[in-house]
Image (cartoon, rainbow, N blue to C red):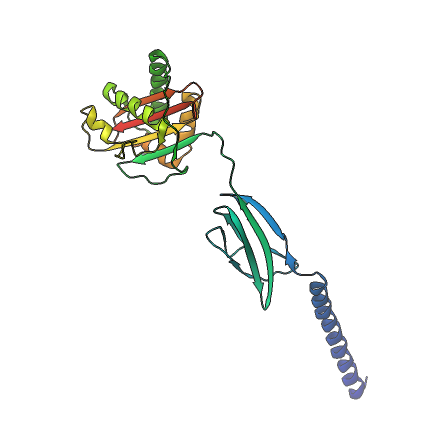
Amino acid sequence: MTRLKKEVYRFAIVIFFTVVTMGMIFGVQKAEASGKIKLNKKEIILDKGKNCRLKLKNTKKQPSWSCSDPSIASVSPKGKVTAKKTGTVKITAKLGKKKYTCTVKVKKQKTRPQEKNLEIINDKIPFSPIAKEETKEKDVNEKNIEEKNNYAQQILELVNTERKKQGLSSVVLDEKLSQAANKRAKEIVTTFSHTRPNGESCFTVLKEYNITYRTTGENIAAGQPTPESVMNSWMNSPGHRANILNGAFKKIGVGYVGTDGLGYRTYWVQLFTN
């Protein structure tokens, strides 16, 4: 093959690969442009406290997100919408100069009885997974003393079983502490909170029974039907679990009130001291 033919051959190969490459690029661009960019939802109805995910279809680019009223709903940088209070807002995804909107309607969540938990450690509430709720004060029909004492003994055994698994010493059931816990159980029927109905801290009940302490903790719950179920709820919550497995605690008081259908029906209290 002469030098001229070689040069022509090389030039033809270069042209061929250039055309193929351009064809591939054009094909990719055409394929990407073939799908219309749009939001996956145009309208959403959410209960208060619920969330959902919005995203742009037919593009891998990340848009910027905004909400017309952040007090009603919020939107994360990845398009996660969280309903805060009742109302209607517009969620906007901006990609370049184009905007894509979704209408979000937030409605009030239907309230229904459910299990509730709240824990406190050393006079400080680390978190409150369920908001404070109050029920109208009514006469409370307590379960008989034998049932109450039986429940207290069962919870004591369940607590010490969990402590033994962690190599901790057992706590003992204290009579005065249980009297204080039973008073707190009556109080949380009307005010499910570590703040007592009179506005004072839950730990002021200890002074009423002449209980001295260096460290203390309280767990409360409502709606669980048995000692096993309430212990399961507490052990699956980090704050409650921390109280039950606190090595500084040596005594426990257990309080229980059954309301014969009023409110959440069953109310439970654990009080711990050193």
Q: Is residue 211 left or right of residue 135?
A: left
Q: Position of residue 160 (x, y in %)?
A: 33, 23
Of 235 and 23, which appears nearest the observer?
A: 235
Task: Indicate the quadrant containing the N terminus: top left, top right, bottom left or bottom right.
Answer: bottom right
Q: How many marks?
A: 0
Rendered residue at 45%/29% (across/down): 115
Rendered residue at 58%/46% (across/down): 45
Q: Is residue 83 left or right of residue 32?
A: left
Of 221 and 7, which appears nearest the observer?
A: 221
User: Could you tell me if residue 242 is visible in this image?
Assistant: no
Q: Is residue 84 left or right of residue 103?
A: left
Using the rendered view, name the quadrant where residue 187 is placed: top left
Task: Indicate the quadrant containing the C terminus: top left, top right, bottom left or bottom right.
Answer: top left
User: Could you tell me if residue 20 is visible in this image?
Assistant: yes
Q: Position of residue 266 (x, y in %)?
A: 41, 23
Using the rendered view, name the quadrant where residue 260 is placed: top left
Q: Is residue 152 left or right of residue 5?
A: left
Using the rendered view, name the quadrant where residue 242 is placed: top left
Q: Is residue 91 above or below residue 146?
A: below
Q: Position of residue 251 (x, y in %)?
A: 25, 24
Rendered residue at 37%/34% (across/down): 118
Q: Position of residue 153 (x, y in %)?
A: 34, 17
